[in-house]
Amino acid sequence: MFVLAPSLQEQPMIFTGQDPIEALRDVLEEQYEQHSVRLADLVARAARTADPHHSRSRDDGRHGDGKRSGSVAGQAALSAAAEAEVAASRRELAEIARALRHMAEGVYGRCESCLEKIPLDRLRVRPHTRFCAPCETRPGL
């Protein structure tokens, strides 16, 4: 499993002397780059896994008894897990891209539901959040 770099994990940020929105832009751009690298890695690994000629070991993929390593069910489960990781990474990239686009449009930091400003402390924890805390916990969103 891929471990997120510390800057990709949701954690409060401390800004020193820099405009908070510019600092958040820097964080989002860094997260976008790291998630892009992660997605490329996941896609490459999924392609290698799907390739029937790819061996997971240095030999021909057989155990000492001559039987192939892994099963069809095991490979399908791995493929489903890889697909889920790719989909999650694509969603995260889309959320970050949306936040960067909102910055460019001058609407960043507004709740997409109630249109109120999202508190800076919340944006520091999750810079690509789309909703204020009350709206995010509302059923139906």
Image (cartoon, rainbow, N blue to C red):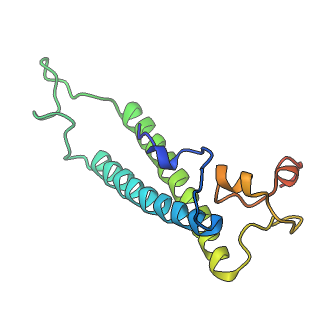
Q: Residue at image x 59%, y 71%? A: 100
Compared to residue 63, the image places residue 25 above or below, namely: below
Nearer the observer, 139 or 133: 133
Q: With 37 as the anchor, is 133 left or right in this view?
A: right
Nearer the observer, 93 or 75: 93
Residue at the limit of the structure toward the top, as seen here: 65
Q: Residue at image x 36%, y 58%? A: 40
How many labels, in total? 0
Instruction: Please identify the quarter of the rendering in which residue 74 is found.
Output: top left
Residue at the limit of the structure toward the front, as seen here: 17
From the top left corner, tell me how far across and down residue 3 is, in percent: 43, 39
Instruction: Give the quadrant of the C terminus.
Output: bottom right
Q: With 54 as the anchor, is 138 left or right in this view?
A: right
Nearer the observer, 110 or 12: 12
Instruction: Give the quadrant of the N terminus.
Output: top left
Q: With 26 as the anchor, is 125 left or right in this view?
A: right
From the top left corner, tell me how far across and down residue 80 is, in percent: 48, 42
From the top left corner, tell me how far across and down residue 99 is, in percent: 64, 68
From the top left corner, tell me how far across and down residue 120 is, in percent: 73, 58
Q: Residue at image x 33%, y 30%? A: 71
Q: With 141 as the anchor, is 103 left or right in this view?
A: left
